Image (spheres, grey):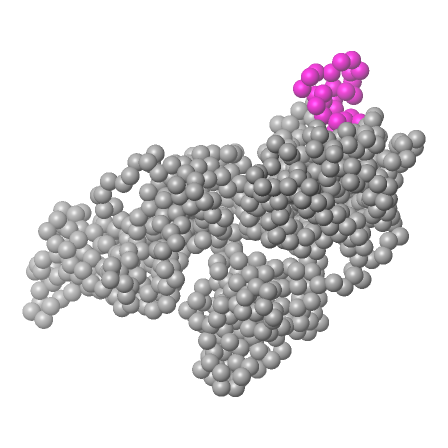
Amino acid sequence: MRDCYCTVNLDQEEVFRTQIVEKSLCPFYGEDFYCEIPRSFRHLSFYIFDRDVFRRDSIIGKVAIRKEDLQKYHNRDTWFQLQHVDADSEVQGKVHLVLRLSEVITDSGVVCHKLATRILECQGLPIVNGQCDPYATVTLAGPCRSEAKKTKVKKKTNNPQFDEVFYFEVTRPCSYNRKSHFDFEDEDVDKLEIRVDLWNASNLKFGDEFLGELRIPLKVLRQSSPHEAWYFLQPRDNGSKSLKPEDLGSLRLNVVYTEDHVFSSDYYSPLRDLLLRSADVEPVSASAAHILGEVCREKQEAAVPLVRLFLHYGRVVPFISAIASAEVRRTQDPNTIFRGNSLTSKCIDETMKLAGMHYLHVTLKPTIEEICQSHKSCEIDPVRLKDGESLESNTENLRQYVDRVFSVITTSGLSCPTVMCDIFFSLREAAAKRFQDDLDVRYTAVSSFIFLRFFAPAILSPNLFQLTPHHTDPQTSRTLTLVSKTIQTLGSLSKSKSASFKESYMAAFYEFFNEQKYADAVKNFLDLISSSGRRDPRSVQRPILLKEGFMIKRAQGRKRFGMKNFKKRWFRLTNHEFTYQKSKGDPPLYSIPIENILAVEPLEEESFKMKNMFQVIQPERALYIQANNCVEAKAWIDILTKVSQCNQKRLAVYHPSAYLNGHWLCCRASSDTAAGCSPCTSGLPANIQLDIDGDRETERIYSLFSLYMSKLEKMQEACGSRSVYDGPEREEYSTFVIDDPQETYKTLKQVITGVGALELEHAQHRRDKFKRTKYGSQEHPIGDKSFQSYIRQQSETPAHSM
């Protein structure tokens, strides 16, 4: 049996790691990882490791999906065969070189041809065992010769600048005449190639590590001399037989990858304005936003970009109020209100997820952490009880946990975000107006979201809401399931609560809570979060933990003679301060009040020869920090920037490099108080929860409309059919909600026009990009398979239909 874990890597940089599943050959992880990708990459890779207590963990195998193949597996559960991993196949990075063939006249007047190979630089080499000291070997190889030369070793960098030239004699000297200029023998040149190998200089006894190679046949010089290009490094073909894939097992993944090209804001004005008017359209089913929900295969697809767009422009409450009122009018039974997967319920879910995440954390996280750490047994099913466990003791443990969770939820009303309260107020009013005889419907309309779709799922699966870093262990998971079931029933305010449980042991346990005080507490809480005249939650000044984790920081030089070394520290960010301490739970060694953060910017790698560094700039000095990977670095920079965005003394310019040896490395200014030399990153929204790019969301909505264009056209036909024909309609039209065919048709026409205009802009952009892109450039090195397939697509597509 094995103790396995899985890592997610951009090329070879680890950005996420699952928990370890012990003693299993078929581990189930069930973990979700989401990130914005902050750099270009070639492969999304997954490595399976076997933990070893005494030695370095061993790699079982990997799955590497090329970037251009990600769409093939988009949002589909897929089994991938594990591939064998060895040093010769693990390559990344690119090389910039120049080849030049020239004639050299010797002292005796004899002419010979010389090949000059200039290795300029490399970028993005892998970091091996925490370090990268690269050098290159350059070999001229042929059937009868192999001549090798070597660059100097560049220390502590994975972007080495070599700029070294090596000369090789290519042809035998011959008598000089002008006609023989570059007239070398065909068979010689056709069989010769330049091979460049990159190595990591290692102090280990096993020798230097191979980083990748490239092979260039000299016949490329027939087309142009000199030949200058960027090349992707390739794996070495060592001729050894690798293990069969089926010998290593397989990995089940679901990868969702989206890539949008976003134009400047003015391109989106027609479509964006049409969407933002949705709340004012009568009936709302004829609005552009509602139409998107009708044509998308999954309502969730439409809800995510719509909610983000409306939140960005402050229109989410009127839009959700409009579609909720329309849904309530269509509902016949008050007991089924908002129970389906409609556009309304998905939009409210997404709003709660975006606007309510910090509320969820500050309310539930301390209690969830306590349940996870205490490991008290709470099993109340007599069939599942283990030997030695007491049913009474377990019942008491569970009752205490439920009481704790119920108490923190029902006393958290003042912390509920305003946008959620405004939505709940509109739901309550719409439900009470529609079902005037049912006095409880004003509560159940709200509780169906706040309890059933917000708190209960977070208790059940805390890792999906970032309340825990990984899945909980089986015992804790069972405890949280029982707590979640009870909280869900308490919040539902149903008439016969014990009957709502299928299990008799749950019905018996629920009798503990069958008191009026629990129902009163729920109603008071629901009244508070759905009333229009509630207190502003921003006046509740309690620290909210935003992010924490280990990083490496450089000493700031607060002591006059102290060493400026690097140390690993536990960093903690709240909405009040940014602190670090030796370990989690220790007292802070240093604290920066949020109002003292003047800027948060990346730090150039050349400063300390270290990747993923950023700087937190304060009035007297800058704190230099190294994150674990590029995704972590971006996440810290983003959250620190957002939380300090409203500071009045924020800087407009900064130094992108460090102050070392008496001067700034970027601008060479000697004063440590010299004004910055580069503009700071442009401002972000001050609201911590809602960092949203409105143009990007509009582009996403355009992509969905474009994808479902055939359904838009079918909906147009349905509108036409209903306008002229009152009889039974065709089955394919019956799935659409169309209250006013004429208004809906008018909106559909505007949507299709707006989508068509954006499609023309995208086509023009693709043509322009195709014209100015050069194969072998830094952006598209030779060996870039995604660019090769792009070239093939463009050459096959006629210009007029592109």
Q: Residue at x 23, y 54 (%)?
A: 195
Q: Residue at x 33, y 65 (%)?
A: 133
Residue 123, quarter of the rendered image: bottom left
The relative height of residue 787 versus residue 600 in the rendered view (above or below) is above
Residue 589, quarter of the rendered image: bottom right
Q: Nearer the viewer, residue 59 or 431?
A: 59
| The residue stretch that appears in magenta | 718-745
Q: Where does the image place residue 741, in percent across and percent down from the top left? A: 78, 26
Indicate left or right for 38 with 398 as reference: left
Q: Where does the image place residue 498, in percent across and percent down from the top left? A: 77, 32
Q: Where does the image place residue 359, in percent across and percent down from the top left? A: 72, 53
Q: Nearer the viewer, residue 619 or 444?
A: 444
Toward the front, the furthest residue is 388
Q: Where does the image place residue 148, in percent across and percent down from the top left? A: 18, 60
Q: Is residue 640 visible?
A: yes
Is residue 734 part of the magenta span, yes or no? yes
Toward the bottom, the furthest residue is 560
Q: Residue at x 66, y 63 (%)?
A: 574
The relative height of residue 205 versus residue 306 in the rendered view (above or below) is below
The relative height of residue 629 versus residue 393 in the rendered view (above or below) is below
Indicate left or right for 791 with 263 as reference: left
Q: Nearer the viewer, residue 753 or 60?
A: 60
Indicate left or right for 547 with 722 as reference: left
Q: Is residue 117 visible?
A: no
Toward the top, the furthest residue is 727
The relative height of residue 86 versus residue 670 in the rendered view (above or below) is above
